[in-house]
Amino acid sequence: MLEVNKLNCKIDENTILSDVSFKILSGEICAIIGGSGAGKTTILRILCGLEQRFTGSVLVDNKKIEKGTNYFGLVPQGYSLFNHFTAMDNVAYALRKVKKYSRQQACDIATESLTKFGLKDKLDCYPSKLSGGQKQRVAIARTIVMEPKILLFDEPTSALDPEVTRDVIETIRTLSTTGIPILVVTHDIPMARRVATHVIFLDNGIIIEDCSGKEFFANPRSDRVKCFLNENI
Amino acid sequence: MFEGFRQIYGEIPYILSGVGVTLAYAVIAVVFGFFGGIIIATIKTSNSRTLQWIGAFYTSIFRGTPLLLQMFIIYFAIPQVLGICISAFVAGIIAFSLNSSAYISEIIRAGVNSVDHGQYEVAKVLGCSKLQIMKDIIFPQAIRNVLPSLVNETIDLLKESALVSVIGEADLLRRANIVASEHYLYLEPLLVAGMCYYVLVMALSALAKLVEKKLSC
């Protein structure tokens, strides 16, 4: 379970987040929705330790997270695969360097994970030879093998065609069945509608709505959300 | 001209033996310059303002003054001030290495900046240390991206190594000049030296293309 309490973030006199608090339970797929500059990505950056300029607390399974702990797995926007590594090395690298597995062990785990994602025949391919959907799956495999407690997706379907988007949605759903809480930052509303069991709507760093996915899309309470949904569907 | 070549024919091996000296300068200076360049680039891309300033100051000094002046300071001025003796070879190597470190650091810094910052962040989230990220993820890609610029720098060094003839090192150009003075024939020895430089540069370019092809993925 992920619990975020009174997260405030100010960068260069600009308030990015104001008193942001929410909870994500095991097995939930939570979508954080909002316009550009709403503070969605900042939340992800704070959670995975890339942004230090904040106050408030983050708890994972009721334990406050400390610096240097890798509770979060991030699948970034644009994948950020290591371009000079093959798909297998992309997945195996952190296993060897962080988890200190032997090369053989790391390669076995990477092969198994990539095979699960349907990339058995792409193990030795460099990212430049992979399609957008394949890169996305390598990025997910690279994150999953590190066994994070929470999975974070930053705009997972941006620049993907509808078919690949469907694959990504299926992958996220499958992952959630393992009980791992998933946080998806997106402004792809149709995708959020299909995948999210929990939705947080953020506007100018403030949470406007925090409810179940069904409720959010069927009965949006605030006018801001109604307006946003009308513009984006 | 054939008559001229006939006259200096016996001296050609003497000129050609300068290739070793020229190559030694270029190779040693590039190796030291490369590692020095990595250190200075790391300093420049660090989070410490003081270190960044030191890196920028170093580069500005070595880029802002002529290489010949730097070599004279190392060969003539420093031994005078410190009361030590530095051989022409060592002085030349120090000058070339320090100078190329400055240029290579800028090339590598540009290379580091050319690598998608997202890769750095992802590796950090995966739990990798800064050293691991720089050594395994950023530098290999940065160097691949700037390989043509690094080759240009090596070619420049190879050609600029002719400057060591000024402090008495018997490199390719100095040997050609000695032969020219002895026979009072300038065109032929200089053509031999020019040909050697050209062949070396072409060989280096071909090698670089091969490496570039191998590294492309």
Image (cartoon, rainbow, N blue to C red):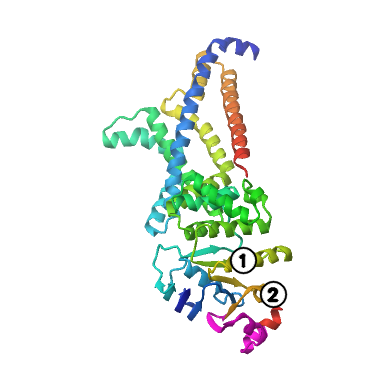
Quadrant where the C terminus of chain B sits is top right
Q: Is residue A12 above or below residue A222?
A: above
Q: Which residues are magenta?
A: A202-227
Disc 1: host chain: A
Foreground residue, A40 or A180? A180
Query: Are dots 1 and 2 on a single chain?
Result: yes
Task: Write the residue at 26% across / 33% down.
Answer: B83
Foreground residue, B135 or A11? B135
Task: Write the residue at 44% across / 44% down.
Answer: B62
Q: x%, y% of residue A42?
A: 52, 71
Q: Is residue A95 above or below residue A65?
A: above
Q: CA distance from mark 1 to mark 2?
A: 18 Å
Mark identifier at residue A174: 1
Q: x%, y% of residue A36?
A: 61, 74
Element carrying mark 2: helix
Task: Write the residue at 63% across / 51% down.
Answer: A127
Q: x%, y% of residue B24?
A: 46, 28
Q: Amino acid at mark 2?
A: Pro
Q: Is residue B142 visible?
A: no
Q: Amino acid at mark 1?
A: Thr
Q: Is residue A9 above or below residue A88?
A: below
Q: Crowding at label 1, few (<14), some or many (≥20) Cα neighbours within 10 Å?
A: few
Mark identifier at residue A190: 2
